Image (cartoon, rainbow, N blue to C red):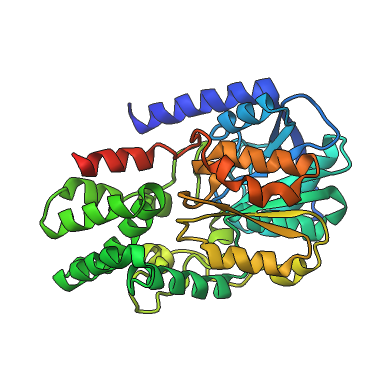
Amino acid sequence: MSPAGVDTVAAGLAQWHFRRDGFVVQRPVFPGESTTFPLVAVRTGRRSDLPVLFIPGGPGMGSVLPYAGLRAAAARRGLDSIMVEHRGVGLSRHDRYGRDLPVPAITLVSAADDLAAVVRHCGVSQVVVYGSSYGSCLAQVFAARHPELVAAMALDSPLLSVEEDLAMVRAHRRSLLWHGEDPGLVAVASAVHDLADLGVPMAEISHVVEVVYEFAGARTLLRLLRARRLDRLLPIWHQISRLGKHYLEGPGLRFVTEPDLVAGIAYGELGFGLPPDGQPLDPQLHFAAVADRQPSYRGQPLDLPARLAEFKRPLAVVSGQRDLRTPRPVAERAVALAPEAVLVRLPKVGHSALDTHQLAAVGVARALTIGAAQHLPMEAFRFAALPRRGTSHRLGPVLNAVTRL
């Protein structure tokens, strides 16, 4: 199917979900101005006094179409779910005249205030907020600006502070997969060194290692690294190395991932384009080729660690064992900061349970709605054992099967 055909199908599906569960809230394009745009949101499940506001990652990820399965799973478990199509994305991409929203109008603060407008429109006094990856950052900004609307919060694969997080990510990746400080990853680290010594570009190695380790685990990664050293499985290697390139270099996939208009958040506020440090396995290598064409980094709008220390409501921090993008040390820091935080350690899970293990995410959200946050650490292994669902949960089994063959 042609790209235009894919867009047409995606548009039809998104509109179908909107007609079934959606509503529109008129929002100012810029704060204080009279010009508005239609912000789209959906609400699924039996209505309750304490819905769950799910906020996906990105920025640029759609909510209405990609997470229809999540909302259905949540509804089957008795949850009342709200999701907001992020300004500048999907059904919230255009102003009332059909023009793209201007990039300067799309900021963390404006997106957080959009969430508050939707919650108030729904007529509820509070929500449980579940934010994943970038969504965890947006959730914290929302909670800081509108604390009266938040009953409890889950931060899945959390982001806290751009520069400090990046230092922790680099140290964690290198300790595991370059220095081999985990006994179970010594062979993997050695295989990474072998490819670097052969002259395989470090940007390729870094990205492939991240994807395969998170989705398929150490054994599958080791098989692929050894195959690459022997010039085997090259089509698979190059396919993985290109994963995400459409997000960085193109318009994305309409109604699913649309990175262009949210570049001011991604690069200007979250530091996607911060320069590599010249050391191996740097996550910034993935963005280096396009960073000079993106907005300059100006910093986060709020000191999130300081605000998290003031958050005195139940908080669940969800952390996948194999997460290399927002790894366990960042999650542990979030738990140490927040007075009522618990850590939910999900074994054999990578980044963002909301995308790779949705039943676990729904389980965490449900526990927060019934006031059972304190039991979540003991439930982590049970959640992890549930059937895998999500927008990208199939990638791991596919990689495992291909490398075995």
Foreground of the two, 45 or 258: 45
Measured as percent of width and height from the top left, residue 61 is found at: 54, 45
Foreground of the two, 291 or 62: 62
Measured as percent of width and height from the top left, residue 81 is found at: 71, 34
Residue 79, picture quadrant: top right
Report the residue at 33% width, 75% height from top.
179
Q: Image check: 186 left or right of 339?
A: left
Foreground of the two, 217 or 25: 217
Q: Quadrant of the N terminus?
A: top left
Report the residue at 78% width, 60% height from top.
340
268 in relation to 263, above or below: below
Foreground of the two, 342 or 230: 342
Q: In which quarter of the image is the C terminus?
A: top left
Q: How many marks?
A: 0
Q: Is residue 45 visible?
A: yes
Q: Is residue 105 visible?
A: no
Report the residue at 69% width, 42% height from top.
365
Residue found farthest to the bottom: 278
Residue found farthest to the left: 230
Measured as percent of width and height from the top left, residue 171 is found at: 45, 74
Measured as percent of width and height from the top left, residue 84 is found at: 68, 40
195 in relation to 25, above or below: below
303 in relation to 250, above or below: below
Q: Image check: 201 left or right of 137?
A: left
Report the residue at 62% width, 47% height from top.
101
360 in relation to 45, above or below: below
